Image (tube, rainbow, N blue to C red):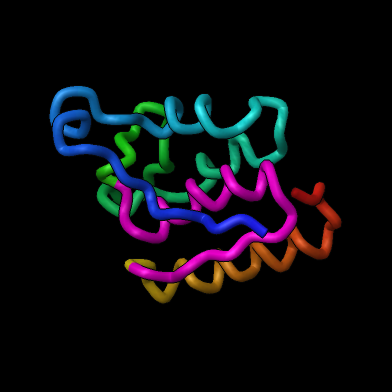
Amino acid sequence: MTFVPSFRQSWLRRRFNPMTVATYLKKNIDPANEYAGEIYEHFDMFVANRRIEPDTKVDTLLGGHRKLLTLYAALSRCRYVAYDMRAVGPEAVSVIHDLVKQHVSRGAPRC
């Protein structure tokens, strides 16, 4: 079982070289994995009717989208994960629970 940590970045790195969604996915998810592009299907909360793009900065994402990003990375590696719902809004809680239930029932690889 793997714990899904919250996304963290040092102040210096966040200030001078902030990580984008595409960079995070390249570092943490295999491009051939089914979860590699799923984060781009969600809408950005800051700009109405705009989806999350590869050049979106991770530190501008709200709590639910950040958690989804780290959760996709963990689910690409393991079947069973432990995660918390700190700083996640009520609309993202149901999306996250449904995603995890679907992943576990599908029978993904074990760690």
- The quadrant in which residue 102 appears is bottom right
Q: Quadrant of the N terminus?
A: bottom right
Q: Residue furthest bottom?
A: 90
Relative depth, front residue between 110 and 59? 110
Horizontal and vertical percent for residue 28? 54, 33
Residue 76 appears left or right of 51: right
Question: Per the image, is 65 magenta?
Answer: yes
Residue 31 appears left or right of 93: right
Relative depth, front residue between 109 and 56? 109
- The quadrant in which residue 98 appears is bottom right
Above or below: residue 10 compared with residue 71: above
Q: Residue furthest right?
A: 107
- Segment tinted magenta in the rendering: 61-86
Horizontal and vertical percent for residue 104? 77, 62
Relative depth, front residue between 44 and 8? 8
Relative depth, front residue between 95 and 2? 2
Residue at point 37%, 48% (across, down): 7
Horizontal and vertical percent for residue 53? 42, 33
Above or below: residue 35 compared with residue 93: above
